[in-house]
Image (cartoon, grey):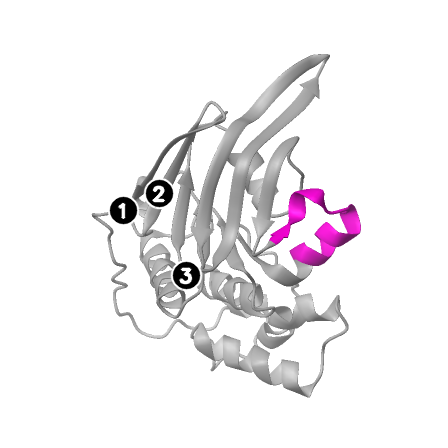
Amino acid sequence: MSVAAQMVDIKKEYVLKSETVRALRGVSFTVPEGDYVAIMGPSGSGKSTLLNLLGCLDRPTFGSFYLGTDDVSKMNDDQLSHIRASRIGFVFQSYNLIQQLTVVENIEVPLYYQGRVNAASRKRCRELAQLVGLGQRLDHRPTQLSGGQQQRVAIARSLVNDPYFILADEATGNLDSVTTEEILALFERLNDEGRTIIMVTHEDEVAAHAKRVIRLRDGLLQSDIQNETRIHAKPKPRPPEPEMAH
């Protein structure tokens, strides 16, 4: 099976006020293509540091981090920037949409940075909007969308470059329980279609939907287990949401 991401003996150290802080102390794990992983850990566990490394926002002090077959831990800043823009799909707790742009235009944003906006890319962005259930709202702006709909736009945007994996950081943190279930159902459907998902969360109820749960503590990998009691999302049917006022 092909590998989406692999951490090999990752250590990350910081120097704060002449004191060395060992945020990660030899973490190793592999994420095969098509996996759905939840990463958990209390404050101070190294979870945020690991998130930054997975997102190519930082480099390890020691060890190797592979995306596919490429060791990104050896890349320079420009190379890391290219990887972030083209090979990782980010979904954050805040949706980070541009208020002046429509749904389709927000999905297109990563393509602007690569000079790849054309008729074919616009068609793909419309298809992604359809995929996440926003086919009837292509020309709506964020102020006309609910929180759940805005997060769907962010998920579609994360897919536009066909990334190695979707990196979701507390992606349901701003949503109510009903909308959370809808977003988790969307992640599950994307995973069923072969998308790799790495989800960072502090909520056991959210992690329960993943195929696998990795727990960190004190900079070490405490456990890495297959989720034998995985919960499948069951969103409740509800009437179409009214458009939000400008």
The residue tagged 2 is: 213
Q: Tag 2: residue type?
A: Val
Mark 2 touches mark 1? (CB < 8 Å): yes
Residue 80 counted in the magenta span: yes
Density class for disc 2 (Cα within 10 Å; few <14, some 14-19, many ≥20) is many
Farthest-out residue, bottom: 119
Which of the marked residues, 2 or 3, is nearer the chain's N terminus?
3
Alpha-carbon span between mark 2 and mark 1: 6 Å
Q: What residue is shown at x 47% (from left), y 64% (from top)?
A: 146
User: Which of the two residues, 4 or 196, is positioned nearer the viewer here?
Assistant: 4
Mark 2 or 3, closer to the camera: 3
User: Which of the two residues, 40 or 143, is positioned nearer the viewer here?
Assistant: 40
Residue 73 counted in the magenta span: yes
Alpha-carbon span between mark 1 and mark 3: 15 Å
What is the number of callouts on the image?
A: 3
Which of the marked residues, 2 or 1, is nearer the chain's N terminus?
2
Mark 1 touches mark 3? (CB < 8 Å): no
Q: Secondary structure at mark 3?
A: loop
Q: Quadrant of residue 88?
A: bottom right
Percent position (x, y) of residue 228? 22, 47
Image position of 135 with respect to 93: above or below:
below
Q: Is residue 174 visible?
A: no
Farthest-out residue, left: 229
Percent position (x, y) of residue 218? 47, 22
Q: What residue is shown at x 45% (from left), y 76% (from top)?
A: 131
The residue tagged 3 is: 34
Percent position (x, y) of residue 40? 41, 37
Q: Start and end of the magenta stretch?
A: 70-84
Alpha-carbon span between mark 2 and mark 3: 15 Å
Q: Tag 1: residue type?
A: Asn
